[in-house]
Amino acid sequence: MDRAEIDEEERGLLFFGKSMVHKCSEVQENVFLLETNITLKNAAQLAPCPGQFYLLRSAKSAVQLDRPISVFSAQIHAMAHSSIRELDLSFLILKKGRGTQELCTSLPGDEIELIGPLGNTFTVPQDVDFSRPEICIVGGGIGVAPVAFFASSLPEKSYDFYASFKSGSYGLEGVKGAGRIVTTEDGSVGIKGMLPAALDAGKIRDAGYKYIFACGPNPMLSYVKKIAEEAGVKAFLSMESNMACGVGACLGCTIKTSQGNKRVCKEGPVFPAEILSFDPPPAKRAPLEAGLKPDLSVSIAGVRFENPVIAASGTFGFGQNYRGLFDVNRLGGICSKGCTLEPKEGNPGVRIVEVAAGDINSIGLENPGIPHFIEHELPEMLRLKPVAIANLAGSDLKSYVEGAKLLDKTDVRMIELNISCPNVKAGGMAFGMDVESASMVTAAVRKATSKPLMVKLSPNAPDVVGVAMACVRSGADALSLVNTVQAVSINIETGKPMFKNVRAGLCGPAIKPIALRFVYDVVEAMNALPAAKRVPVVGIGGIATWQDAVEFIMAGASAVQVGTATFSNPNAMIEIIEGLGLFMQSHGYKSIADMRGVAQTERAV
């Protein structure tokens, strides 16, 4: 066999392929047992050892990266007169994020993708006497899976097993040690309390343990390291880290040790405890008092919003299209579709192309014109409870100013000035691309209206922060950012660009980290100004969940606009509002202002 075909340690072949889910059942709240089977077609193909893991992902997944999941059990069935072997695998999975949720909701017959087995193993030192329990095994929560697999590989009654859970217990069926001690935080099973209630340095010495093997959350592992050192016993700990490749190539999962950086996927996940160090757990905020609800209202340029969730311009029409799908009156605000002084037909040809985690669109500001908007669409917007915001677009300075003058005479609560529009007198370059033109159009519109003015910024400017500060100096009462990111799509059948204008706007979850960075940078620059000169920032770009909204607010945004997410989930904004409230309740934030900008001051890592 060619050396390039076997793994780095030259042990054998790794498995990469799909398998069928046999069963996926909930064994504890949010903990699922997933059972599958793969075929090892070559004698050199590896089977997992205790402590190793596979990268797993649903074959129909919407996530980019596989999830590292420790093996809970593995059984090999040899085929007569053949090198082919059948491998039954099971995994205990905690339903936590999108990737694990997809795995945990698998049905029999669904396909999953696997890569593995990966990582090193729990290895029993040669001086262990199996006639008595010289080995102490510790599992905490979902970390019980790999150590239970390890326990099942040892002779019965040759070890003691400690398992610690918040509530209930699971994964212990194959544990047949001399002692099996369970602790639960709520006292529902075994000893009430966490691991310290059952195990300390004195008990390690009294029991005569020579080695400790453990897997669980970092606070528990830190405690195991501490008591092992106090007792003079060697410990081996299975660690976790975010990872991409799982084979040691990307260096995304390294942890610091006394021997330098180590890859969890390659040198680990099992490490000798003495080379590890643990940061103290971050302080947790106490939840709000029972019955006390957080205040989600915000004030932007003197305008009060019931909550910080605003429908983004260009995605919500004029507030009427989604009526009947959900209660649009629950939103904090609605930005109208971008309106120009004169009606526009928009761009010809293809207008939307789906891409990974979003879409590229080239609508071309199709709209009925501001006079028509004022007479027909705006009255309907004003009948709704959310704050009505008119998005003002234009192709030259005069059209911006004349449009602002017309809107100034209406009851619209706020104008959002879209400076991502092409400036025909500057060769089609958007007004927001440089400091001078952004300042000029903001100042001109500021003189034309007494309405609160929020300027919407483009992410395509070479100096977004500079443009933002120029707009503030020129009279902006608030900023919203970012608009779509310039992108290109090619039709591989024709060999031509998909869009007539070649370049179009990328939006959706794909741009969220970019948008979040711009919001963070602009708020950081804003905070350097005297308090009286600062203006609120509204975050836009790829916001699809309440977690996304929390990130933008913690970066310093006073509110968020949601757009593309509504296309695939019309209820997205309602879920964001509800999720924000629950998060604030559980984390002790009494108001949006209480949470806003904490990432700027605390610099959480």
Image (cartoon, rainbow, N blue to C red):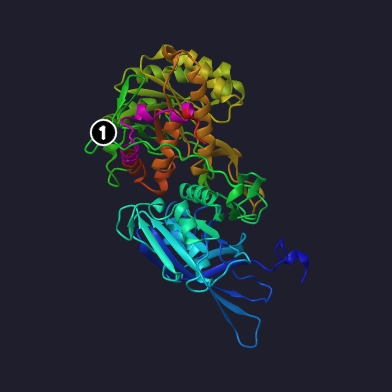
In x, y percent, where is residue 6?
72, 66
Position of 483 relative to 407 (above/below): below
| Residue at position x 43%, y 52% in the image | 96
| Residue at position x 46%, y 65% in the image | 160
Please report the bounds of the magenta region as a residue range: 582-601
Q: Nearer the viewer, residue 81 or 488?
A: 81
| Residue at position x 61%, y 39% in the image | 502
Magenta stretch: helix, strand or loop mostly: helix
Amino acid at circle 1: Leu
Q: Tell me if 385 is positioned left or right of 37 in this view.
A: left
Q: What number of labels is visible?
A: 1
Position of 140 relative to 22 (above/below): above
| Residue at position x 37%, y 44% in the image | 572
In x, y percent, where is residue 183?
37, 57
In x, y percent, where is residue 275?
61, 48
| Quarter assignment of residue 415 | top left
Tell me, yes or no, if residue 103 can be seen here. Answer: no
Q: Is residue 587 magenta?
A: yes
Hey, which residue is sitting farthest left in the picture?
291
In x, y percent, where is residue 39?
59, 75
Q: Which residue is mark 1?
A: 384
Q: Quadrant of the N terminus?
A: bottom right
Q: Tell me if 440 is positioned left or right of 188 in this view.
A: right
**How busy is the neighbourhood of tag 1: few (under 14 within 10 Å), some, or many (20 plus)?**
some
Tell me, yes or no, if residue 250 can be seen here. Answer: yes
